Image (spheres, coloured by chain):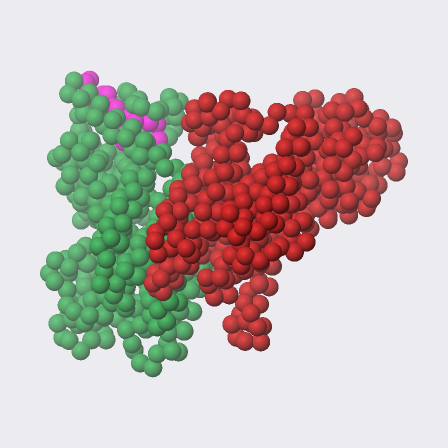
Amino acid sequence: MNGATPAGRRAVSMDLMATMVIVFLAATSPAFDTDDASFFNYLNNVVDARPLYFYTGYVHVIPQVVTYALSPLPLLWQVLLYPVLPVVLAVALYFRLSRLFRRRAAPWEANALALCTIIVLRVVQPVMWANLSNSNWTALLLAAVVILDAGMDDAPYSAWTAAGVVIAGLAFPPGVTIAVLLMIQWARVRRLQPAILAVLIVGGHIIIGSLSPEPGFNTRLLEAPWMFVSSFREYKLIWLITIASVLSLAMAFRWSLRPEHRSEHLAIIGSLCAMGWLSLGLYVASTRFVRYDGGIPPRYAVPVMFCGLVAVAWMALSQPDALERSRRLGIYIGTAIACGVIFFYSNLRGPMEIALMKYRFVSDAAAWRQDCKDDQVLVFEADAASPVMFCRPRLLPEGDNIIRSFTPMIGEVGDGDIDEDLPYVISPRPLFP
Amino acid sequence: VRSVSVDFAAVMIITLVAITAPAFLHDDAVFFNYVNNVDRPHPLYYYAGYVHVIPQAVSWMLQPLPLVMQAVMYRLVPFALALLLYRETARLLAARRPGDEASMIALGIVLVLRTVEDNLWANLSFASWLALLISIAFVIRVRLESGTYSWFAFCGLLIVAVAFPPGLLLVLLFVANGATTASLRIRIQNLALAVITVAAHAWVASGSPIPTLNTGFLDAPWMFVDAFRERKLHNLVVIASLVTLPVMLAWWTRRARSLSQDVVVIASACAIGVGAAAVYVMSSRFLHYYGAFEPRYAVTPAFCAMLAVAWTVLADRAPQRRSMSVGIFTGIAVTVVIAAIFGTLRGPLEFALMKYRFLGVASEARLNCPPDEVFVFEDEAGSPFVFCTPRSLPPGADYRLNGFAPSVGVSAPDDAIDDRPFLLNPRPFP
């Protein structure tokens, strides 16, 4: 789009606004939370830390590599840079999604739909946007959109794009779902490149899975329906969103099978259905489903929900009646606006304030490390996902190391039970010993 | 052309909204207790400083029915009014742009109001508010059509206008309609409504046992600031409405060269919306709630602001932009109502069913009980209860149940003597 034309200027200004909105979404999201602290604790408390290692049953390629690359920096710089990658990935997701939608929409419409999709995802899964450890999910969605978009042009991938797709595909177990998109693309265009990328991703997962210290599959698969029923009340909202997404995809698939649509829309809608349904199926077939007693934490609903949203947006954009099309786009935008307002109204500053407290703790810990006793450890709070700081890095045996044998000093908000729920420092099995 | 499918969807959604709304709460129980426990109850009486014409008259008329039937009928009245509100709002908006778009926005307005005040949709004691909103939409539409009121409409408007203090706001519309028409009949109808309404309110207020005006009016801004956090959402709704309405009016006035239909609608909405907030701030209720806008007092400004926005959206001549705006409005409305209902989908209905069951049990127990016994649903001021036999009590006071032997019903903590429900035996009107 030419930025000199009025429409081009409108699209550029909307891009700028969308980038600011995404930065705002990230700033108000939980940061340096959950596994971010585990990766940080490992790299800064263990001697000879590895870049890639097994953690909770698999290798978290993106966060592990990034935290490793950042580890030579001062402590505070490390944690301040952790959210940069998730934000960059989210902005990239916005631009690629907008590019995909522009195939059927004016630039400003495509920008609006892309931004709205991200807002709804942010509401359902808040920890994806500033937590490095959850950036795998954003990378997965980004790779999926890149494949869908490239598939419509039948153009070959550049080396950078191919590398990015493989990294996103190998980054964590749900990454294997994009191999399906690549195989669909291969089946359509009969070009070798997507097939090679798919084989690389599937092969990589098989190798990593065979080395994993934990089983990857749900051995109680026949019990899955009962587990789902018994967990429904606890995870009601997320299950309902998941079911709605599955049904939306089914509706979109049926729509794409109409004779007048088949040639035009079946590829993209079919790909979205394959990815969405497969991601849910893989979750149910994984040990995670058993670990959560048949529940579904929000992150596992993200791929199917994303596919459902994109499919619904695509159907709205493809509506032949101009007025009906505008109305459907309006409903999509209005729903996203309402979701955003309701969500942010109730919890605007909380996550940012907690992140700032943690940053202050890390800064204090860096100063404390210069003058401390060998058996001391500084703890942010008595919580498993809390950042901790040994007086100096240690050589630890493989396995999780609870810090009970040290003299813990509680940092900012030590309100947990220090005897029961102390954080740990992982010293895991490396991927390449 | 209005689509039947939109209307059908609206009826279904409003039914769901009414079923999931809190029912037989607050003053519903007070009115119920009065007509079922006091000998020869009056149809109209002072309660909380004024006469609640609609709920008092309806509960009095329903009194001959079995107890459970009365309580069920209490929720059918606001449900019927909610459907009527949708219909009247859609008809008003259709005056600007006939078709589905007006109906969709009307439904959106009703749904947003559900999130502003959830008690409106199944509580008889809140029916006056719905009736007021219906009247606002109706009077504005009749003004646009330069029509006269039928006798039925005239009586209905009169009842709503005198039903409770905010009904006085309708005088603004009556006077405006009467003053700007060339038709003598329309002028007489509107001026008659205005005069009767003002006189009726003056008469009621003169006999009220509670002062109705806010005597600390100059402190109102500070009280509002102090109370802001307590009712943040509703205070924000009122502020947004009070900003939107004058901005819309200024925009339309500048755009229109004469007193067009658009300006009439926006000016009417602005007058009623701003007037509703002003009347509340000037009333003793504002002091009673320490300067916060209780949800019901935010309803009228919010309705008027949404009406003005909807009218402006429908006036857009670019069809695609208009359709998208309608879609955005509908998307927002549906999402906020889902968010509001989701957390408490079954709770209010289950609670209401418990109360209906209690009334069923109490009806049977009443056939064979000692005279000093009283069946109480729970030890709370707004709880329904049933005396063994209706009693003749001297007027002018609320009677705590301490002198009786309460048999507690379904879900009562047994130590809340201080918060025991009371039996109203108020000063009758006139």
Residue shown at 23% from the left, 34% from the top: B33
Question: Could you tell me residue B45's position as x and y percent?
Answer: 21, 44
Q: Is residue A110 magenta?
A: no
* Magenta residue check for B373: yes
Q: For the image shown, how many numbered marks are present on the structure?
A: 0
Residue A378 can be seen, yes or no? no
- Residue B262 lies, in percent from the top left, at 31, 72
* Residue sitting at x 50%, y 22%: A220
With A322 as the anchor, is A164 left or right in this view?
right
The quadrant holding residue B247 is bottom left
Q: Name above or below for residue A197 compared with residue B225.
A: above
Query: What is the display colour for chain A?
Result: red
Relative height, residue A197 to residue B157 (above, below) = above
B361 left or right of B299 in image: left
Write down the region rendered in magenta: B369-388
The tint of chain B in the picture is green
Foreground of the two, A355 or A272: A272
Q: Main secondary structure of the magenta part?
A: loop
Question: At 71% from the left edge and 46% from the top edge, which residue is drawn?
Answer: A82
A243 vs B323: above or below:
above
- Residue A353 placed where, x, y %? 65, 45
Residue A159 visible in image: yes
Q: Residue A354's x, y, as percent?
A: 65, 42
Q: Nearer the viewer, residue A66 or B354?
A: A66
The answer to which of B216 and A412 lies nearer the viewer is A412
The N terminus of chain B sits in image quarter: bottom left
Q: Nearer the viewer, residue B69 or A194?
A: A194
- Residue drawn at the location 53% of the way across and 42% of the way down: A180
